[in-house]
C-alpha cells in the first residue's frame, strides 16, 4: 500500500450518523408518530389469480374505531411502474380493480384508530372472487395453453431482451470444445430489518407529506404524484433513516400508496407498517431464473462463443424486473472477452409475487451459471482455473462490443493475488475445498427509463460564517453509508476537516433530486456532484484569497486541512474559517454556495465504470448430511480509490453474508403461488456463527470517471459467492450443482445419483 | 381484558403503567413510554431487534408480556450512555463501524452488553458469535460487530486504557 495522499479519503472515520444510531436516537419511519395519526392495514388476496366480483366494506365500517375503507375504485386507477417511458410496462395498480394476480396482492385498505381495530376490520370486508386458473412457473406460463395473466400479453411474455456481438455461429465453428448446461436459480427476499413502512399526512391545502422507508425519495415523490394526481412539488418525501433497502425499496409499494390514499380521504395522518409476513409475500424478490448456457472454447482455454437463453419468473408485475433481465444477460458475459456472444432473455409473467431488483441486479444468478461452467470446462480440458480466467479476462480499455468501455480494470491483479492466497493455504482437510469466482459490476446505471428531467445526481454546498459546510444531496443513505462517503468527498474537495461537514439528505423539500440509492450509483454519481459543488465553493473562496493575498497570479492557491495557502509556499496562508468570515463580508453577507451535478455521457449502454473482483470461498461439506459451511471468504477487490475505509469493509462483509445466504440458505419455495416460508423461523439468513472470516485484498486502480478514481463497492460482491461455493463443492466432491441456493438435500441427492452412476465424474 | 398496574424500573427510573395484560414489553416501552430505540422486525421472536435487558439479562421485548416484568429493572439502549459518556459497547460499535442501517443496532448493542456482563472474557470469537446468535443483522455480516465486542472484551475501552 502506498501512503495515503489524501487528508480525509481512505481514512477510518466514524459514520456521520453513528451517534444517532448507537444511542437509539435514529428515527425510522417505523418510529414516526404524528398527532391524530390513524393506523392502516391492507386486505390481501388469498388467491393467485381471480377476478374481483365485488368488495363490500359495510360491516367493516360499522366496527367502532374504523375511519375508512378504500378499494381500487376510490383511486384514480392508474397503472404505474418505474419504467415510465414505456407505458406497456406500467402494469401495476397497487389497489387492483378487476383482477388479483398473486397471493397477497392488495385489494382494500382500512384506517382505524388502532392497528388492532384495523386488523379486525379486514376480516369484515366481504370480497367476492371468481377464481381463475393460475400458473406460477415461467416455463409453464410461456406455453400457448397457459392462463393469460395480463390482458393481451401473449404467452405471458412481459419483456424480451437481446444482446449480441460477433458472429456466434462462426465462433462456435472455431471452438474445439462445446459444453451446454441448464441451471435453475431461486428467488431471495430482501429481508430488510425495517419492513416497508409509511406515514402519509395529507392536509386539505392539497399538500402531502410522506415519511417512508425508501431508497429514493425523489422516485417516490414522482411516482406518488402520478398515482394520486398531485403536483410533484406538493409532495414531500422524508426518509431520514432507512432500515435497509437492498434493491427492494425504490418502487412504489402498498404502504406508500394505501397510506396516502387513506390520508387523502380523511385528511389525517395514516401509518402503515408491513408485518414480516407481508414483507415476505407481498413485496418483490430477487428474480428466479432458468438459465441455458452453451459455451465454446479452444483447447487452450480461449473463449470463443457463448449463447445463453434465460427465462425469468417475473411474477405478477414488471417493477424493476425489466432491468434485471437486461443486466443478467450483460453480466453473464462478465468479466471476460468473448469473440461472439448472444443472449436472449424472456421475462414471463406468473401468478406469484413480483420479482425485481435485488443487490447484484441479476448478476449473482448470471455468475452462478457462468463461473461454475468455466470450472467444469477447465476440468474437462485439464486446464488451471486461474489460467483459464486470466487468458480471457477484461483489461483496462477493453470494449464490450456495442455495450461498454472499461475505463479501469484490476482483474488480472485480483487473479494473481487470489492465486497466491490459494497457494499459501496449502493442502486442505478432507471434504474441504476452495472454489473461486470472478465477477464485475456496474457503478450506477446509464438508464433513465424513469424519464427524470433532472440530473442523475445533484449537490449543493453552502458555507456558513463559522466555516461549517451544509451539504445538501438527494442521495439516500440506507445504511450503506453514503452520507459519510459524500461528507468525506466534500471535505477532501474543499480542503476542510470532516467535522466541518453537515450532510442533509432524505428530504425532497430540502434536497436536490437524485435517482437514489440503487445500482451502486451514489459514490460515483452523487460523489461527482458533491465534488463539483465543493470545488465550485472552493473556487469562490480562493478567488477572494487571491485578491486578499495579492500574490503574483502565476501562483496556485489551495486549501488543505483547513489551511488556505500558496501551493509553492505552503507555510504562507491563513486559517480557512477566518478566510470564510472575510469572504462573506466581501460578498455583502451572502453565504458561499457551490453547485454540482452529474449525468453520465458517452459511457456506453450500461455504466460509467465497472468494479472487478475475484473471490475464493473455502467450504466444508458434510458428505452424510449435505450440510455446508463456509470457513473463509477472501476477495481480491478492485473498487478504484477507496473513499470510506470502514464503510467499505462493512459493505464487502455485508455483501458476502447476503451472497452466502443466496448460496446455501435462503430458499424461497413457492407452491401453488404461495410463498411457503414467509417468516424468520423458516426463512433462514446467515446468523453470526455462520459467518466466515472475510479477508479483503484491495487492488489499487484509478477510475478516470469516478470521484478521485473511485467506483462501485458493496453490491458487486453479492455476485461471486454462490458460484464460488458451487465450485468449492465441485472441487471437494466432483458434484456439479446446477441449482441455487444449494440446499443440503440437493447435495445428498446428488451423492446418491452419483453413486448410482458408478461414482464417475 | 381488565387492565393491570405495572410498576417497574426503566433505566433506573420508576414508571407506573395501567396496562392491558396482553401488552408486550416492547410495546410498553415503545408505545407507552417512548423508549423507541428497541424496534420490531418479526412476529416470531426470531430477529432480536427488540432486545432489552431485564435485570441484566438480554430479553427479546416481543417474547415477554409487560406485566411479567413487574418490579424488575429494565435497561434499554437509551439508558446505556452515562453522564454524557457512551458505554464501551457503543463506543466500540462506532469505532469498528459495527452498524449500517442501524435498525438492528439497539437490540444488537443490548445483546452485546448483556453477553459481556455474563462473559467478560470470551475464550474465542466463536463464543462472541454465539452470544449474538439471536440477533439478525442484514447489513454488516456481523464481523465488524464481533470485532467491536472483542475490542471491549480485550479491555480497549477500560478506564485509563
Image (spheres, coloured by chain):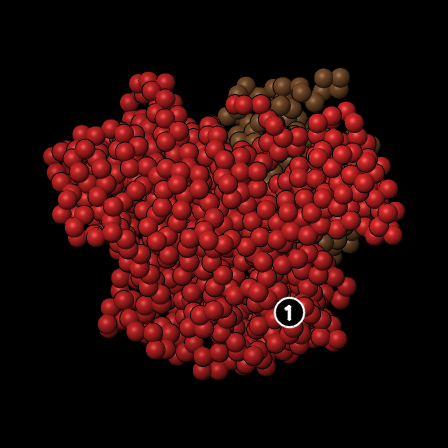
Residue drawn at (57%, 42%) of the image = A707
Left or right placement of residue A60 versus residue A497 in this view: left
- The quarter holding residue A634 reads top left
Could you tell me residue A622's position as x and y percent? 31, 30
Image colour for chain A is red
- Looking at the image, is B64 positioned above or below residue A266? above
User: In the image shown, does A364 or A306 lie closer to the viewer?
Assistant: A306
The number of callouts visible is: 1
Any part of residue A671 in sight:
no
Q: State which chain is coloured brown.
A: B
Could you tell me residue A212's position as x and y percent? 63, 59
Left or right placement of residue A99 versus residue A39 in this view: left
Residue drawn at (33%, 20%) of the image = A423
Residue placed under numbered mark 1 in the picture: A232
Residue drawn at (41%, 78%) of the image = A51
Could you tell me residue A262's position as x and y percent? 64, 72
Q: Chain of mark 1?
A: A
Residue drawn at (64%, 35%) of the image = B109
- Looking at the image, is A381 positioned above or below residue A53? above
Pick out the residue farthest to the left.
Answer: A758
Could you tell me residue A384's position as x and y percent? 24, 28
Quadrant for the C terminus of chain A, please.
top left
Left or right placement of residue A601 versus residue A194 in this view: left
User: In the image shown, does B136 or B157 lie closer to the viewer?
Assistant: B157
User: In the image shown, does A239 or A42 lie closer to the viewer?
Assistant: A239
Q: How crowded is the residue under tag 1: few (<14 C-alpha within 10 Å), some, or many (20+)?
A: some
> Quick one: SS at disc 1?
helix
- The quarter holding residue A116 reads bottom right
Any part of residue A79 in sight:
yes
Amino acid at each position: 500500500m502506498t501512503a495515503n495522499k489524501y487528508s480525509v479519503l481512505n481514512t477510518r472515520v466514524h459514520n456521520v450518523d453513528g451517534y444517532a444510531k448507537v444511542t437509539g436516537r435514529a428515527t425510522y419511519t417505523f418510529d414516526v408518530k404524528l398527532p391524530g395519526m390513524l393506523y392502516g392495514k391492507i386486505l390481501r388476496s388469498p388467491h393467485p389469480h381471480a377476478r374481483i366480483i365485488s368488495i363490500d366494506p359495510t360491516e367493516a365500517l360499522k366496527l367502532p374505531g374504523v375511519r375508512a375503507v378504500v378499494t381500487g375504485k376510490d383511486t384514480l386507477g392508474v397503472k404505474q411502474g418505474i419504467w415510465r417511458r414505456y407505458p406497456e410496462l406500467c402494469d401495476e395498480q397497487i389497489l387492483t380493480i378487476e383482477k388479483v394476480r398473486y397471493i397477497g396482492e392488495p385489494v382494500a385498505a382500512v384506517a382505524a384508530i388502532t392497528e388492532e381495530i384495523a386488523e379486525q376490520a379486514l376480516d369484515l370486508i366481504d370480497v367476492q372472487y371468481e377464481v381463475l386458473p393460475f400458473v406460477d412457473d415461467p416455463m409453464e406460463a410461456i406455453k400457448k395453453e397457459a392462463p393469460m395473466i395480463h390482458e393481451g400479453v401473449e404467452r405471458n411474455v412481459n419483456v424480451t431482451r437481446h444482446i449480441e456481438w460477433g458472429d456466434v455461429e462462426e465462433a462456435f465453428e472455431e471452438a474445439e470444445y462445446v459444453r451446454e448446461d441448464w441451471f435453475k436459480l431461486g428467488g431471495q427476499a430482501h429481508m430488510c430489518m425495517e419492513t416497508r413502512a409509511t406515514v402519509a399526512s395529507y392536509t386539505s391545502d392539497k399538500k402531502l407529506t410522506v415519511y417512508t422507508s425508501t431508497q429514493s425519495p425523489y422516485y417516490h415523490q414522482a411516482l406518488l404524484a402520478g398515482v394520486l394526481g398531485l403536483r410533484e412539488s406538493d409532495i414531500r418525501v422524508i426518509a431520514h433513516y432507512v432500515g435497509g433497502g437492498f434493491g427492494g425499496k425504490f418502487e412504489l409499494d402498498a404502504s406508500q400508496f394505501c397510506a396516502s390514499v387513506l390520508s387523502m380521504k380523511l385528511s389525517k395522518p395514516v401509518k402503515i407498517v408491513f408485518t414480516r409476513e407481508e414483507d415476505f409475500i407481498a413485496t418483490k424478490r430477487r428474480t428466479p431464473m432458468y438459465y441455458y448456457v452453451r459455451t465454446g472454447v479452444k483447447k487452450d482455454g480461449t473463449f470463443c462463443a457463448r449463447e445463453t437463453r434465460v427465462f425469468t419468473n417475473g411474477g405478477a408485475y414488471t417493477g424493476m424486473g425489466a432491468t434485471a433481465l437486461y443486466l443478467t444477460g450483460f453480466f453473464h458475459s462478465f468479466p471476460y472477452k468473448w469473440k461472439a456472444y448472444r443472449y436472449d432473455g424472456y421475462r414471463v409473467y406468473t401468478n406469484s409475487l413480483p420479482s425485481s431488483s435485488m443487490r447484484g441486479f441479476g448478476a449473482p444468478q448470471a455468475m452462478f451459471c457462468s463461473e461454475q461452467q468455466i470450472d467444469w470446462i477447465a476440468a474437462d480440458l485439464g486446464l488451471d482455473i486461474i489460467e483459464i480466467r486470466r487468458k480471457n479476462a477484461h483489461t483496462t480499455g477493453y470494449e464490450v462490443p456495442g455495450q461498454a468501455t472499461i475505463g479501469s480494470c484490476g482483474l488480472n491483479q485480483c487473479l494473481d493475488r487470489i492465486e497466491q492466497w490459494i497457494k499459501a493455504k496449502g493442502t486442505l482437510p478432507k471434504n474441504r475445498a476452495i472454489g473461486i469466482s470472478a465477477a464485475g459490476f456496474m457503478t450506477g446505471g446509464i438508464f433513465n427509463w424513469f424519464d427524470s428531467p433532472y440530473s442523475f445526481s445533484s449537490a449543493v454546498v453552502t458555507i456558513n460564517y463559522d466555516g461549517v459546510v451544509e451539504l445538501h444531496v438527494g442521495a439516500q443513505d440506507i445504511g450503506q453509508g453514503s452520507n459519510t462517503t459524500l461528507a468525506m468527498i466534500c471535505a477532501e474537495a474543499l480542503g476542510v476537516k470532516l467535522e466541518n461537514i453537515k450532510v442533509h439528505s432524505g428530504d425532497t423539500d430540502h434536497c436536490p433530486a437524485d435517482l437514489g440509492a440503487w445500482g451502486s450509483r451514489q459514490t460515483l454519481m452523487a460523489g461527482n456532484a458533491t465534488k463539483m459543488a465543493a470545488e465550485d465553493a472552493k473556487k469562490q473562496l480562493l478567488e477572494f484569497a487571491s485578491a486578499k493575498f495579492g500574490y503574483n497570479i502565476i501562483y496556485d492557491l489551495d486549501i488543505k486541512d483547513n489551511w488556505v495557502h500558496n501551493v509553492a509556499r505552503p507555510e504562507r496562508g491563513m486559517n480557512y474559517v477566518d478566510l470564510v468570515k472575510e469572504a462573506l463580508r466581501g460578498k455583502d453577507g451572502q453565504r458561499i454556495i457551490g453547485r454540482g451535478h452529474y449525468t453520465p455521457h458517452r459511457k456506453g449502454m450500461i455504466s460509467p465504470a465497472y468494479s472487478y473482483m475475484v473471490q475464493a470461498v473455502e467450504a466444508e461439506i458434510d458428505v452424510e448430511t449435505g450440510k455446508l459451511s463456509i470457513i473463509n471468504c477472501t476477495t481480491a477487490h478492485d473498487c478504484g480509490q477507496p473513499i470510506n475505509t470502514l464503510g467499505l469493509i462493512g459493505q464487502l462483509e455485508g455483501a458476502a453474508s447476503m451472497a452466502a445466504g443466496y448460496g446455501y440458505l435462503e430458499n424461497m419455495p413457492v407452491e401453488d403461488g404461495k410463498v411457503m416460508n414467509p417468516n424468520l423461523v423458516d426463512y433462514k439468513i446467515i446468523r453470526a456463527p455462520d459467518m466466515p472470516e472475510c479477508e479483503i485484498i484491495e487492488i489499487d486502480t484509478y477510475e478516470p470517471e469516478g470521484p478521485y478514481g473511485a467506483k462501485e463497492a458493496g453490491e458487486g460482491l453479492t455476485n461471486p459467492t454462490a458460484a464460488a461455493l458451487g465450485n468449492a463443492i465441485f472441487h471437494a466432491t466432483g458434484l456439479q450443482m446446477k441449482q441455487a441456493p444449494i440446499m443440503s438435500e440437493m447435495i445428498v441427492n446428488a451423492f446418491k445419483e452419483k453413486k448410482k452412476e458408478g461414482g464417475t465424474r | 381484558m381488565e387492565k393491570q398496574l405495572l410498576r417497574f424500573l426503566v433505566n433506573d427510573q420508576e414508571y407506573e403503567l395501567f396496562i392491558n395484560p396482553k401488552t408486550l414489553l416492547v410495546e410498553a416501552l415503545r408505545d407507552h413510554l417512548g423508549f423507541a430505540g428497541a424496534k420490531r422486525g418479526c412476529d416470531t421472536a426470531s430477529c432480536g431487534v427488540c432486545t432489552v435487558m431485564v435485570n441484566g439479562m438480554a430479553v427479546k421485548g416481543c417474547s415477554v408480556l409487560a406485566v411479567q416484568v413487574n418490579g424488575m429493572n429494565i435497561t434499554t439502549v437509551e439508558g446505556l450512555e452515562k453522564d454524557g459518556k457512551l458505554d464501551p459497547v457503543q463506543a466500540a460499535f462506532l469505532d469498528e463501524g459495527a452498524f449500517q442501517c442501524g435498525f438492528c443496532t439497539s437490540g444488537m448493542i443490548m445483546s452485546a452488553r448483556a453477553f459481556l456482563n455474563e462473559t467478560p472474557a470470551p475464550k474465542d470469537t466463536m463464543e462472541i458469535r454465539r452470544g449474538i446468535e439471536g440477533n439478525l443483522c442484514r447489513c454488516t455480516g456481523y464481523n465488524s460487530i464481533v470485532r467491536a465486542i472483542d475490542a471491549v472484551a480485550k479491555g480497549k475501552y477500560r478506564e485509563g486504557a
